Image: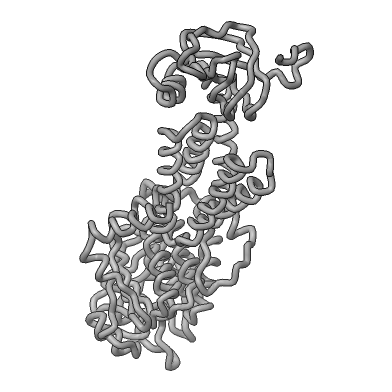
Amino acid sequence: MTSLLLAFVILASTLFPERAQSQEIRKGSVVVVPLSGEVTEAQFFFLRRILKRSEAAGASALIIDMDTYGGSLKAAVEMLGALMKSTVPTLTYVNTNAGSAGALIALSTKRVYMAPVSAIGAAAPINAGGEDMQQTLNQKVVSYFSGYFRSAAEKNGYNPELAEAFINKEKEVKVGDKVINPKGSLLTLSAQEAVKEYDGKPLLAQGVASNLEELCEKAGLRARDIVRVEPTGFERLAQWITVLAPLFLVGGMIGAYLEFKSPGFGVAGILSGLCFLLFFAGHYIAGLTGFEVVAVFILGTLLVLTELLFFPGVTLLALLGTALMVGSLLFAMVDFYPSQPLDFSLDLLFRPLVNLGIAVALFVLAVSLLARFLPELPLFNRLVLATQSPTGPSLQMRTPSMFESSVKVGEEGVARTILRPAGKAEFGAALVDVVTDGEFLDPGARVRVTMVEGDRVVVEGLDGIPGSSPLA
């Protein structure tokens, strides 16, 4: 799976060669991330990935090139969290709008610079349809998020009163005796107002810059090290994969279950591998995981297969392998940064645990339904038995000289392969393809025929059934 994941990433670079080259971040790079149009969850995934890459590479700074009238408050909060975690110095270049959610994101960076003609502010929350919220709900939202962004602004050295005035129109802002924003209107600052100094300190922005090169000069950064990054089409794919993570997980689990219950390697195994591949690839692109997590998952899978194929009954290998697989799936969804210590708090693990819990619940439900109805489906018999059996009747003679005969209901025999639920059992001189009614039986288990329909022979295990007669 590691090689497939690597091929997936290489394919992305092949399809977008100019972007792959422009996104090469080195030690000392000044990384420029565009944030234009509506602020969305997809932009958060993109920003988070670049922040982590910049931190891992040792970039000297990250600049958000901003031109937005706003967007999702949820996405803005997530971006704030990502920016506050990063150890890379962050700046915002307002070029030319930082409205609503954009203003709040700008306060999440260490320094703000403005284009000569630009504005920042007016971040009142509204409904998804664009209408104003009901008064009670609006008060709750404003009260919570104004405090949230006040905290971020204060931590980054900005006047926290500005953050509240951006989102709360009832907030009056004064610096000394000077009224910056009267009560009854949301605060919006032009470039000239934002850089105006009060008591020797700019109100909000560090300066005005005509372009990014001038910004770098004023901020003490080397303009020649600028690396521009652009989101690819795979960013949106990554967003959907991470959002639908439980479905990909349950798809991989069900495929593995069906493959485990049928002999050989078939369609179910391929679908399972594809689901897990998409799961890891999406989280890799979204900046949540790396190749090492995939390696742990593969190691766990190999341990489980080793127990099943070579050491049946040695549950320690299967338990260890299962723990590694579950751990890697969980860790792939954990949002941690290279400089962060591995502090697995409830906040960090909440979303991964919810996703994994949903997947496990759906898997248990699906397995219950499959165990009940799967053996009766004609499609299952064709996929499992017909593809594994040679042409001709299902009865296989142990020697060519023996004549073929049919097994009958009630006839007893011995399982010669693992029945999961399909496999082979021996009845007298005949080796027959059989299927259980959902049971899992080891080689050597005694079985009895319960139903014969054409070449389909259904058996049940005799061990533990009172009154069953021993085989001769």
- Which image quarter: residue 445? top right
The residue drawn where x is 44% and y is 69% is: 52
Residue 291 image offset from top left, x and y in percent: 45, 61
Toward the viewer: 115 or 403?
403
Q: Total marks drawn?
A: 0
Q: Is residue 52 left or right of residue 373?
A: left
- Which image quarter: residue 305? top right
* Quadrant housing the C terminus: top right
* Residue farthest along the bottom direction in this orientation: 200
Toward the viewer: 81 or 370?
370
Name the colour scheme: one colour
Q: Is residue 53 visible?
A: yes
The residue drawn where x is 48% and y is 73% is: 86
Toward the viewer: 426 or 252?
426
The residue drawn where x is 47% and y is 80% is: 158
The residue drawn where x is 44% and y is 35% is: 265
Is the residue 31 above or below the residue 464 in the image?
below
Q: Is residue 256 left or right of residue 274?
A: right
Q: Is residue 139 visible?
A: no
* Residue farthest along the front direction in this orientation: 401
Toward the viewer: 91 or 244?
244
Residue 164 image offset from top left, x and y in percent: 49, 69
Is the residue 398 above or below the residue 117 in the image?
above
* Residue farthest along the right direction in this orientation: 466
